[in-house]
Image: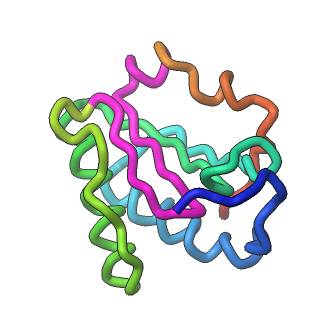
Amino acid sequence: MAKQNSTPRKSSLAIAKKTISLIAELALDKKAEHLVVLDVRKLANFCDYFVICSGNSDRQVKAIADNIREGLQQEGRYIPRPQGLKDSKWVIVDGGDIVTHVFEKETREFYGLEHLWQAGKKINWE
């Protein structure tokens, strides 16, 4: 569900960090690489945080995205079917306030999401 305005949500990093850590753990369980978390609360009106990571192949990207979705659902969160699974070059797992982008390496380099959202603050998720 989209935000109604562009002001930061009440969910703080402290509250979101538990979910971000879970997403990171689920991604790393499937050998995701170069995991980055961006705080985009002041920049985006559709989410608060981006989790961005890479896989080495389309099969690995799909496995990472599926593992994140299944893990979040086991925690009781409704997660719609990820977008981009058909080609699995860039898969988006929409967790509401936290949107995860799982890229194949070359696709991540091509789109440069971290550069496009460079005004977002990188945060330590560990």
Tell me the quarter of the picture where residue 9 sits: bottom right
Residue 21 image offset from top left, x and y in percent? 57, 68
- The answer to whether residue 108 is magenta is yes
72 with respect to 59 (left or right): right
Query: Which quadrant holds residue 125?
Result: bottom right
Which residue lies at the image location 53% right of the left edge and 38% below the top edge? 34
Name the one closer to the observer, 58 or 101: 101
In the depicted structure, whether residue 84 falls above or below residue 89: below
Above/below status of 106 relative to 19: above
Colour approach in the figure: rainbow
Count of numbered marks: 0
Q: Which sits in the foreground, 112 or 80?
A: 80
Looking at the image, is 40 positioned above or below residue 115?
below
Residue found at the very far top of the displayed protein: 110
> Within the magenta stretch, is there residue 66?
no
Q: Which residues are magenta?
A: 89-109
Q: Is residue 111 left or right of residue 118?
A: left
